[in-house]
Amino acid sequence: MTRSIITLTTDFGSADHLAGTMKGVILNINPDAEIADITHHVLPYDLLDGALAIGQAYKFFPPKTIHVVVVDPGVGTERRPLLVSAGTHYFVAPDNGVLSMIYEREEQLTVRHITSDHYFLQPLSTTFHGRDIFSPVAAWLSKTWQTNAFGEEITDFVRFTLPKPKPSGKGVKGVVLRADNFGNLLTNLAAEDMPQVIAGTSFKMRIGNVEISKFAQTFSEGGPNEPVLLMGSSGFFEVAVNRGSAAKVVGANRGAEVTVEFA
Amino acid sequence: MTRSIITLTTDFGSADHLAGTMKGVILNINPDAEIADITHHVLPYDLLDGALAIGQAYKFFPPKTIHVVVVDPGVGTERRPLLVSAGTHYFVAPDNGVLSMIYEREEQLTVRHITSDHYFLQPLSTTFHGRDIFSPVAAWLSKTWQTNAFGEEITDFVRFTLPKPKPSGKGVKGVVLRADNFGNLLTNLAAEDMPQVIAGTSFKMRIGNVEISKFAQTFSEGGPNEPVLLMGSSGFFEVAVNRGSAAKVVGANRGAEVTVEFA
Amino acid sequence: MTRSIITLTTDFGSADHLAGTMKGVILNINPDAEIADITHHVLPYDLLDGALAIGQAYKFFPPKTIHVVVVDPGVGTERRPLLVSAGTHYFVAPDNGVLSMIYEREEQLTVRHITSDHYFLQPLSTTFHGRDIFSPVAAWLSKTWQTNAFGEEITDFVRFTLPKPKPSGKGVKGVVLRADNFGNLLTNLAAEDMPQVIAGTSFKMRIGNVEISKFAQTFSEGGPNEPVLLMGSSGFFEVAVNRGSAAKVVGANRGAEVTVEFA
């Protein structure tokens, strides 16, 4: 029998005890759980950024992994805590849309409103449900696997759609979803949005203060300070600079508009 | 039989190999130990900040957890390495007061001066006792659980008292202990220092360049850029801004004075 | 039987899902593997910095530890993925010299070009081999321990020599390899390069805009803002300031020249 795996994705940063305290709560309930940090550096309060982080990582974990996702600006309010069964994975998160990419990608969804408060830490704080609700629910689930013990199924959970590309003249218009650690700019343009690029059609992409016409297979095809377009590892096109920061060279960041035209 | 759990709290940051090297030392001695990072971002050399990090997190871990706390500006000097049994937890740390919150909160205390140097890595460096003393002692303890093998009990260990609130006019005066990742300002004012606030008495708090009179239950009760007072998850009052940084809005940070007056 | 241990050293930072995704891939193949982060904050694309991180940490881990090292500016190009057996440790990394310190320190070396692509994730991306090649190879190795199943041995692997100190007048000239989290400046000067210092001979070290003549045993021997020379925990001399940042006080950082003269 293999160990239960619980992942953590939060906007708590790493300078505070918060993520560590969540680990303590989990291990106190299930000392045999294996905890894996995905990231604690989701942009503070940023549901889209959180949705992207867990949405890109979860499917690489084993079946039955429990993912705790805490980006929770409404902590302590009436927003509901959720336990979601999605395909072969479980998710514990606030009902604020931070699981939207999961809802989009998984067909078999069961979303429960966690109401069984005997699983919560007491006294229940109004400011740290990562500690008092989400971690203990994940830990208890990793021992019992009885999702229906935590609350009733609901269908009116909160979801948002990721920003979608739109047709624009002879091309398509998208947006930068985020800049990664290297300054690579992740767009919301997927392969199916620009099959011409992959097929080798010439194109002009405008982003920030530059125009890009080179589709590269690898980062190293670009010259110094030359931004190029790449198919990123998550299935979205990315703008990158070889051994440099596209964000700096291009002068763009999250939310920047990207337009692509074909000849 | 459950696994031994060892936590790490240091000011080593995450850019260096230091925390990773400590994990190697522990796993080399006890490959079955489970290591949980609390934080490696205690402010450099800052004993109060370290005391707060471990002091807020430790009690959420299971009984018998061994907490390694390395904020150690005096490394290599005559300051003593300690093994502390406190309630159901163990602590391995330098004798410089970084465990002061533990001493304050736990009644059953046994503090030992670690002198059994056959547990240390050799050659013993003068600059990295996290690797050479604290990690191996924690790892050996997690196998043997024989605290008395590590050294004699002492009573003259170093401790400091956390800054205490003082009466001030018709109210109380406190201090900001730290700003967290969101910019929330943790004060040293606990529930018992201001029961009036919790009871609903009107108050005026001066902090930084603002005056606060709103006691909120949740972060989201505040308007945009409106700093509010909250009861934080660690039992101290906090100043917060809904989806913003109180540190920025209020213009205050660690060490800032906080005064509260009641009508 | 003890668990397999896999360490991670990358330049991915902690703000992205990348390191978390690698953990998912590993646990999906070997749910019983124990994963330990060494650091994800190697300077982006910086092979020397990566070589130093893994080179200083690896030997403290148990025999049979598998170290995944991903600093990989050439990802997706013809640069080869390697599986290295070095002494009692294993390394999985791109063939770009990032393992140079391992090659320098271990005499028993077997370097294999990983070609058995049935171990890779499919479809294979051109931008994230940490996920698609290095993690799965490490995970499969941790189950089978059959290094020869992954590819043929090679001898023409890429290695660079760390910058070496040179004689200079009546002394020696070196370089700053990196500044750590505290601002301590790690030089490339080892004990054998300056035995006179350890023997107590007086010296003058020029670094940045200061001259140093004090060799200290511990950080705390220095006065406020006084830079001193120390023997660091990795066997290299370091310049440090007691409870301060030598990088700031001295005005030097990675790559800065260090000259030492003896009377």
Image (spheres, coloured by chain):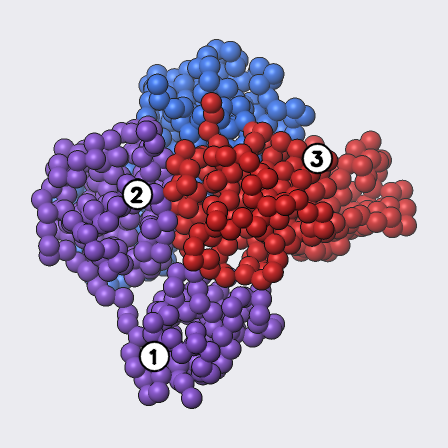
Chain colours: A red, B purple, C blue
Instruction: Identify the secondary structure beneath mark 3.
Output: loop
- Crowd tier of the residue under label 1, counting other residues whose Cα lies within 10 Å: few below 14, some 14–19, many 20 or above: many
The chain containing the residue under callout 1 comes to: B
Q: Amino acid at mark 3?
A: Gln
B97 w.r.t. C69: above or below: below
B160 w.r.t. B37: above or below: below
The chain containing the residue under callout 2 comes to: B
Circles 1 and 3: CB distance less than 8 Å? no
Pick the residue in front: C210 or C82.
C82
Which numbered disc, 2 or 1, marks the residue closer to the eye? 2
Q: List x then y, in percent, for residue C202.
A: 15, 49
Work out how far the residue at label 1 is from the one at label 3, CA to CA, in angstroms.
Answer: 55 Å
Q: Which residue is mark 1?
A: B173
Q: Which residue is mark 2?
A: B63
Instruction: Identify the secondary structure beneath mark 1.
Output: strand
Horizontal side, residue C194 vs residue A36: left or right? left
Pick the residue in front: B102 or A56.
B102
Residue C16 appearing in the image: no
